[in-house]
Image (cartoon, rainbow, N blue to C red):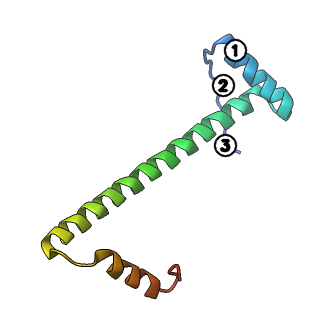
Amino acid sequence: MPAKTRVNITVDIPTLRLADRLARARKISRSAVLREGVHALASEHEKQQAEAELVEQQLQAVATMDRMAQKAGDWPAVEILHAWRYRRPGGKR
């Protein structure tokens, strides 16, 4: 277990009461409740960052495909992509 450091924090009374209720219900200390809360918040933040990066990558991929479609002119893109997808191992069919 990593070394612990004592700190003073300021919270409003309802938050303190909520932390105390959670601590009693889970049979852990108030400090443990706060530690878990920080870790949960950090985990959620990392998840949101990863999702935002994925969305950005998807938008860039769509923009690239749009540019390619404009250069290629009129072609059956959906049929070609479906044929390619379903021939790949792990494809939907």
Q: Residue at x 62, y 40 (%)?
A: 40
In the rendered image, the vertical position of residue 11 relative to residue 91, given as above or below: above
The amino acid marked with disc number 2 is Arg
How crowded pointer 3 is (Cα within 10 Å; few <14, some 14-19, many 20+) is rated as few
Q: Which residue is mark 3?
A: 2
Among all residues in the image, which is located at the extreme top?
Answer: 13
Q: SS at mark 3?
A: loop
Q: Residue at x 15, y 74 (%)?
A: 73
The amino acid marked with disc number 3 is Pro
Give the x, y percent position of residue 56: 34, 54
Q: Which residue is mark 1?
A: 14
Spatial CA span between label 3 and label 1: 30 Å
Occupied quadrant, residue 84: bottom left
Occupied quadrant, residue 82: bottom left
Contact, mark 2 vs mark 1 (Cβ under 8 Å): no
Q: SS at mark 1?
A: helix
* Number of dots carrying numbers: 3
Spatial CA span between label 3 and label 2: 13 Å
Residue 57 vs residue 10, the one in the foreground: 57
Spatial CA span between label 2 and label 1: 22 Å
Q: Quadrant of the N terminus?
A: top right
Q: Which residue is mark 2?
A: 6
**Relative to residue 72, is residue 15 drawn left or right?**
right
Give the x, y percent position of residue 37: 65, 34
Contact, mark 3 vs mark 1 (Cβ under 8 Å): no
The amino acid marked with disc number 1 is Pro
How crowded pointer 2 is (Cα within 10 Å; few <14, some 14-19, many 20+) is rated as few
**Relative to residue 66, is residue 90 drawn left or right?**
right
